[in-house]
Image (cartoon, helix red, strand yellow):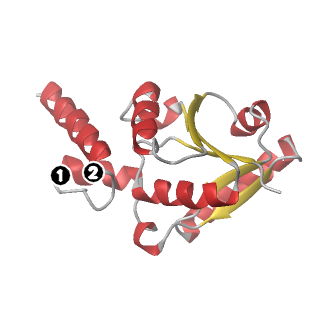
Amino acid sequence: MKAAAIYGGTFDPVTYGHLDLAKRGIEIFDNLILAVAESRSKNPLFTLEERIEILKEVVRDMPGVEVDGFNGLLVDYARSRGAAVVLRGLRAVSDFEYEFQMALTNRKLDGHIETIFMMPKEEHSYMSSHILKEIVRLGADVSCFVPPFVKKKLEEKLITTQVDRL
């Protein structure tokens, strides 16, 4: 029996790695909610509203995938949406320790919500949003890491930010 799942993250910005997990996740679950975390502590480049807009644009042709924003604990958000599963991506061993701690904490907070880990395809396993933003700041082409719409938004935001600093 399929169920609803939550794939939460800051998505600052969304990458092909995120989209790979979303595409494979919707093959497993009836409904996949991409839950964009406000995450003020991470100092995101894009506002919550911008990240939601960008994500909605790049998944608009993915039936069963919904985009929503949230603030607070992911497990609370999952419960409020009636989701039984939290989907998390693991790129490298370094991700595992943090994700393992979060999964166990979420289980303690709500034992009815399971965490399922998925690994992105190999070609996406080394890219992070942090590295991606640095590549753009240094003027390199990121077309192989993000959809064209995301690339455009990234370049607009980073060029504007750099010009504002001058």
Residue 117 seen in render: yes
Q: Residue at x 78, y 54 (%)?
A: 2
Q: Residue at x 46, y 45 (%)?
A: 59
Q: Which residue is mark 1?
A: 138
Whole-percent x and y of residue 5?
Answer: 70, 47
Amino acid type, label 1: Leu
Q: Are marks 1 and 2 in contact (CB under 8 Å)?
A: yes
The image quadrant where one finds the C terminus is top left
Relative to 60, is 85 above or below?
below
Residue that protrudes farthest toward the right in the picture: 111
Q: On the rendered structure, is 10 left or right of 131? A: right
Location of residue 119 by image quarter:
bottom right
In front: 56, or 108?
56
Q: Secondary structure at mark 2?
A: helix
Whole-percent x and y of residue 81?
Answer: 74, 33
Q: Secondary structure at mark 1?
A: loop
Q: On the rendered structure, is 47 left or right of 135? A: right
Relative to 55, is 38 above or below?
above
In front: 112, or 54?
54
The image quadrant where one finds the N terminus is bottom right
Q: Which residue is mark 2?
A: 134
Q: On the rendered structure, is 55 left or right of 117? A: left
Relative to 132, is 119 above or below?
below
Disc 2: CA contacts within 10 A as few (<14), some (14-19) or many (>=20): few
Disc 1: CA contacts within 10 A as few (<14), some (14-19) or many (>=20): few
Residue 43 seen in render: no
Q: CA distance from mark 1 to mark 2?
A: 6 Å
Q: Residue at x 62, y 54 (%)?
A: 26
Residue 79: mark: none
Amino acid type, label 2: Glu
Whole-percent x and y of residue 60?
Answer: 45, 41
